[in-house]
Image (spheres, grey):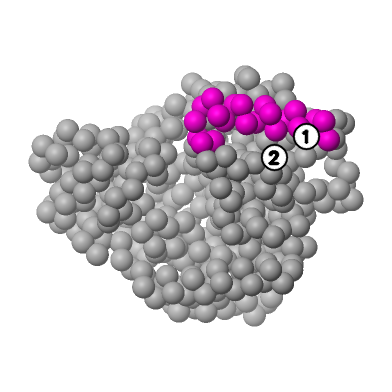
Amino acid sequence: MGDGSAGFIPVLLGGDANAYGMARSFHEEFGVRSRVVCKGAFHICLHSRLLSVDVTEPRLDEDDVFVRALLSYARQLHGEEPSKRLLLVSCGDNYTRLLVRHQDVLRDEYAFRVVSPQLFELFSTKGRFYRTCERYGLPLPATCEVSREEALGGWASPLPFPVAVKPSDDVAYRRCSFPGKKKAYVARVQAELGRILALVYASAYDGPMIVQDFVPGDDSAMRVVNCYSNGRGRVTMAVLGHVLLEEHTPEGIGSYGAIMTSFDDALIGCIRRFLEDVGYVGFSNFDLKYDRRDGTCKLLELNPRQGRSSYFATASGVNLARHAAYDAVFGRELPFQTARPADQVLWTMVPLSVVAAYSAEEAAGKARRLQAQGKVRQTYWGGADRSPLRWLSYQMNQRNYRRQYAECFGRRHGDD
């Protein structure tokens, strides 16, 4: 199918690095050019041979606009290429939420896999996700959910410090803008926690906040698992990544800068059983942290879509697009696939010099070993998408990363 005659057109909801990584995956597997529908496209999606940004609608996160834009675009594509099916893939949290809500209206025009509204509710906020995990006995850090009223009423943490502090509703929090905003915080004492909660609740955000035992360890204690569950609820792919370096800008905390393919059949098996037991469908992305205190990986978050860094799975030999297309378009159930040691790569969004300078010593050593073996893959640059304009854009992106790490590295506490 590498000639571009795959019989379907990927339509990606989102204009960021996640969408671009999916476009690369589709092109590498099927030779097709993806189409993008989004509120606005980031630089990584511009000047590309792998995708075209066909619809930019600033109000796409509004229900009626979302449905109207997708139905109109489907009619346009069916008019251009009537024999091809349209495979719709969400690449963002809010797009997934909208797709779940309006799936019945869109199924006549698009092929896609997404969970039911009832199941989505179990994962729609961190608080609900943690309660679901508890029912299934999955390892979690000790956690409290704090309402606005409790926080502003002088609530005191029952957990020992330091604690992690983050919004329960990521979608609602993302809509807010205020001085000092970070994607997540670390509080070292009660007074600092109080200042963080007061700062957040002085903004438009009024959902619960999560206060959680801070699992000790640097960036290299983080793990990420990317999965795909087919229409029957069977997990057909799962790939584990060992994070070497996270991003450190206020809005970038929790996003990954460099990941090494890793292997843990027991952990993968645990996540597979969980997804299949609850009847999950579609892409899922788990963030975990290795807790050296008891030797377990603690679940921190489930994202109901592939992650911004998910191209590392494709780079490790487990193509995300293959599993989505064979399931939703061709109706074929693929055997379970995961990465193996021979497929290990270092995936990075940031310059290798940043990985070397800011990763923990052991993590930097692992990165150097894979670099020496020529096993480095990047989302932004490489493959079939090379041009002078993309090279210039990529170089500017890498320069910005060097500046950001120099300015922001390690500044995660509330008072930083």
Say which of 342 and 170 sits in front: 170
How many marks the image carries: the answer is: 2
Image coordinates for residue 173, horizontal then vertical, percent: 36, 42
- Residue 354 vs 74, above or below: the answer is below
| Residue range of the region highlighted in magenta in the rendering | 59-80
Q: Is residue 279 above or below residue 322?
A: above
| Residue at left offset 63%, top offset 20% | 105
Viewed as shown, does residue 9 lie left or right of 163?
right
Q: Are marks 1 and 2 in contact (CB under 8 Å)?
A: yes
Q: Which amino acid lies under the numbered mark 1 shown in the image of this protein?
A: Leu
Report whether residue 240 is seen: no
When asked about the image quadrant of residue 9, the answer is top right
61 inside magenta stretch:
yes
Percent position of residue 120, x then y: 49, 28
Side (left or right) of 216 relative to 82: left
- Where is residue 132? Give x, y as percent: 41, 31
Residue located beneath label 1 in the image: 77
Q: Is residue 185 magenta?
A: no
The residue carrying mark 2 is 11
Work out whether residue 50 or residue 225 is closer to the camera in this orientation and state it: 50
Mark sitting on residue 233: none
Position of 125 relative to 359 (above/below): above
Cα–Cα gap, marks 1 and 2: 10 Å
* Callout in the foreground (1, 2): 1
- Three-letter code, disc 2: Val
Prevailing SS of the magenta stretch: helix
- Quadrant housing residue 64: top right
Snapshot quadrant of residue 43: bottom right
Q: Residue shown at 29%/39% (left/top)? A: 205
Question: Of 160 and 148, which appears nearest the observer?
Answer: 148
- Mark 2 nearby-residue class (10 Å; few <14, some 14–19, many ≥20): many
Dot 1 falls on a residue whose secondary structure is helix
